Image (cartoon, coloured by chain):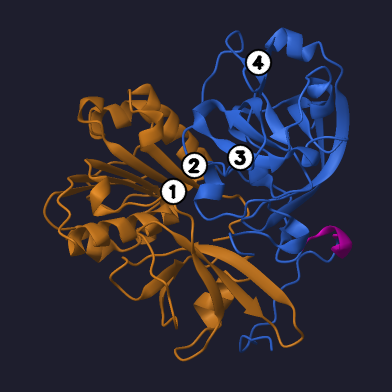
Chain colours: A orange, B blue
């Protein structure tokens, strides 16, 4: 896992939750392109957080090979639906599976930077404590933000947090009640998002207030 | 001049796919990734209908009526704007031509509308003459809800966001009107061979 800060000439600005396209070109002209969620808030330099996929093509390069000062081509920002700004209000329910935390981190940082008061509950599912991305940052998320971790595969000795998957029962206990008309952002692998989004609608969340971003099985991000 | 990324060689994982079938900037996947902007709608089949809306008139089929229409098996390549392509996918569906058969109109565009509020716009000529289907089976099985079941539009020659999931009908239009993703910066037409991903491409 690596967070790369990119100095982009003429960046037009982005909204929290958007992504961008990275294009790598080999000397013989061969190209590979992938999409990554933007990890930084609009007020901050553009950053992406890249999970290294062993059988990947672009992510091993970005994690292992890329050095400060290197350049690569990118295009963006892309996507205008899975985004949050102050004017969208809350309360916010952010639900992340694995590296699905990345665009939600941009939302959290934007909220903090703009003092955009909306109350936030972040439910974050990871396989183990070592897999938790932005751990220190999430330990000190700022006022009005509750962070709930669950570690679904392995828990460290003495772990007092959750170890269950986010199913309908779990969400009924932890998500904002529907009476608050929450705005939900759900990001993670397909099956995770499918389960969580369906459960939230089952709890009475309005479908148009449940925004989803699913990671394809290709691991393109 | 093309920019070279220092030290990047690439893995060229598509060596077994026919390059003439893979549009620029795409790579071949053997999975079937799911991308949707919201929850998967849960529509009971008894409540499902399909409609062609033209001016003030509306022609509607129930699920049973829709399934009684002649259908076709098609094997096509599909291309998602998020850069995956999947070759030789097999679908069963009703040709849009069949649904338009006895509808009188002189429309130039259609807006597909769906459960969950999703819409997408297409020129009429891109969904007629055997170019588009309302698909209800994938790979010999009923179409999964997460892949758009009970039925989705299938327009394989355009980026796959045009193949609207959970489709409930087509509205015939005189003028082109951006759909859901098209209002969020994606291309109005979406030809993968011309890499029309975003507005301005």
Tell me, yes or no, whether dots 2 and 1 are on the same chain. Answer: no
Tell me, yes or no, whether dots 4 and 1 are on the same chain. Answer: no
Q: How many residues crowd around disc 4 within 10 Å: few (fewer than 14), some, or many (20 or more)?
A: some
- Asked if residue A1 can be seen in this view, the reply is no
Q: Is residue A123 left or right of residue B168?
A: left
The residue lying toward the viewer, choosing from B129 and A126, is B129
Which label's residue is closer to the chain start, 2 or 3?
A: 2
In whole angstroms, how far apart are the C-alphas of marks 2 and 1?
Answer: 8 Å
Residue B158: % across, % down: 74, 48
Tell me, yes or no, whether dots 4 and 2 are on the same chain. Answer: yes
The residue lying toward the viewer, choosing from B12 and B179, is B179
Residue that badge 1 annotates: A81
Which residues, given as a range, are shown in magenta?
Answer: B17-23
Circles 3, 1 touching at the beta carbon (< 8 Å): no
- As for residue B18 lying within the magenta part, the answer is yes
Circles 2, 1 touching at the beta carbon (< 8 Å): yes
Query: Tag 2, which chain?
Result: B
Residue A56 lies in what quarter of the image? bottom right
Query: Helix, strand, or loop for circle 3?
Result: strand
Residue B97: % across, % down: 83, 27
């Amino acid at each position: 896992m690596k967070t790369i800060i990119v100095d982009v000439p003429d960046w037009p600005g982005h909204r929290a939750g958007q992504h961008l396209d990275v294009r790598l070109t080999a000397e013989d002209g061969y190209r590979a392109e992938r999409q990554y969620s933007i990890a930084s808030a609009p007020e901050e330099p553009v950053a992406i957080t890249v999970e290294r996929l062993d059988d990947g093509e672009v992510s091993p390069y970005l994690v292992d090979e890329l050095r400060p000062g290197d350049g690569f081509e990118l295009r963006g920002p892309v996507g205008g639906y899975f985004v949050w700004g102050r004017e969208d209000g809350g309360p916010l329910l952010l639900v992340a599976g694995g590296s699905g935390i990345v665009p939600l981190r941009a939302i959290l940082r934007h909220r903090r930077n703009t003092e955009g008061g909306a109350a936030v509950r972040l439910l974050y599912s990871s396989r183990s404590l070592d897999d938790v991305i932005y751990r220190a940052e999430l330990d000190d998320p700022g006022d009005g933000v509750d962070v709930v971790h669950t570690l679904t595969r392995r828990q460290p000795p003495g772990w007092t947090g959750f170890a269950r998957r986010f199913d309908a029962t779990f969400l009924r206990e932890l998500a904002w009640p529907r009476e608050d008309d929450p705005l939900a952002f759900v990001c993670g692998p397909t099956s995770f998002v499918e389960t969580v989004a369906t459960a939230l609608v089952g709890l009475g969340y309005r479908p148009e207030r449940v925004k989803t971003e699913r990671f394809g099985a290709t691991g393109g991000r | 001049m093309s920019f070279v990324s220092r030290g990047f060689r690439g893995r060229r994982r598509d060596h077994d796919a026919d390059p003439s079938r893979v549009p620029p900037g795409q790579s071949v996947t053997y999975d079937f990734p799911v991308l949707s902007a919201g929850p998967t709608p849960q529509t009971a089949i008894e409540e499902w209908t399909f409609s062609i809306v033209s001016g003030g008139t509306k022609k509607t089929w129930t699920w049973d009526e829709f399934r009684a229409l002649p259908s076709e098996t098609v094997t096509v390549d599909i291309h998602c704007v998020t850069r995956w392509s999947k070759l030789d996918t097999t679908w069963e569906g009703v040709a849009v031509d069949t649904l338009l058969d006895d509808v009188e109109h002189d429309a130039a565009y259609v807006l597909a509308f769906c459960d969950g509020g999703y819409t997408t716009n297409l020129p009429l000529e891109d969904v007629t003459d055997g170019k588009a289907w309302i698909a209800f089976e994938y790979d010999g099985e009923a179409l999964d809800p997460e892949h758009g079941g009970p039925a989705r539009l299938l327009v394989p020659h355009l980026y796959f966001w045009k193949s609207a999931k959970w489709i409930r009908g087509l509205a015939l239009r005189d003028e082109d009107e951006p759909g859901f993703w098209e209002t969020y910066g994606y291309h109005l037409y979406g030809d993968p061979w011309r890499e029309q991903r975003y507005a301005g491409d």
